[in-house]
Image (tube, rainbow, N blue to C red):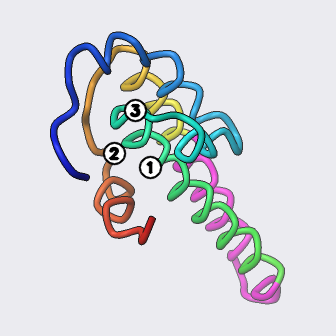
Amino acid sequence: MEGEITREDIDKNKLLAAISYIWILFILYWLVDSKFVKFHARQSLTIFLAEIFIAVSEYILFFLPNYDTFSHIMGVLLFILRIVGFAYGITGQVKKLPIVGDLAEKLPL
């Protein structure tokens, strides 16, 4: 992302950054002019895309043994990432989530 995230931006937009992790509220990326919110909304969008990928692959690969267990574990891990992201947003932290943070930076938005 261009430029630095300012303390004023963080203080003003903590709540929006946190709620961007709730379901499809990553759309705040396009609705709010805040680098802090965009940082968190990008990560939330990446988690959402991973959830869609897992759901679709579950329908396609249902016949594989133990795939449902794998998809459930991945779902729980992604849910935990959402909780951690929410906590980072509400406390004003600009930290990348594991794995997701690096992928989020590569999204062509």
Q: Nearer the viewer, mark 3 or mark 2?
A: 3
Report x, y in % for residue 48.
Answer: 62, 56
- Judging by the rendered image, the residue that carries numbered circle 2 is 97
- Residue 23 lies left or right of residue 98; in this view the side is right
- In the depicted structure, whether residue 91 falls above or below residue 40: above
Q: Quadrant of residue 57?
A: bottom right
Q: Quadrant of the C terminus?
A: bottom left
Amino acid type of the residue that numbered disc 2 sits on in the rendered structure: Leu
Give coordinates of residue 52: x percent, y percent.
70, 66
SS type, badge 3 = loop
Q: Which residues are magenta?
A: 60-79
Q: Is residue 70 above or below residue 44?
A: below
Task: Give, as a three-letter code, the residue at label 3.
Answer: Ser
Residue 100 part of the magenta segment: no
**Percent x, y of residue 103:** 36, 65
For label 3, the crowd category at 10 Å Cα-Cα, with few meaning under 14, some 14 to 19 and many 20 or more, is some
Task: Tell me the crowding category of disc 1: few under 14, some 14 to 19, or many 20 or more residues within 10 angstroms, Cα based.
Answer: many
Reading the image, the residue beneath label 1 is 43
Q: Give the quadrant of residue 108.
A: bottom left
Residue 56, given in percent of the width and then of the height, sits at 76, 76
Q: Label 1 is placed on what type of residue?
A: Gln
Residue drawn 57% across and 34% down?
A: 20
Q: Name which of mark 3 and mark 2 comes first in the sequence.
A: 3
The reply to whether discs 1 and 2 touch (Cβ–Cβ < 8 Å) is yes
- Residue designated by label 3: 34
> Regarding mark 1 in the picture, which secondary structure is present there?
helix
Is residue 26 toward the left or the right of residue 81 in the image? right
Q: Counting residues from the N terminus, which is met first, the one under dot 1 or under dot 3? A: 3
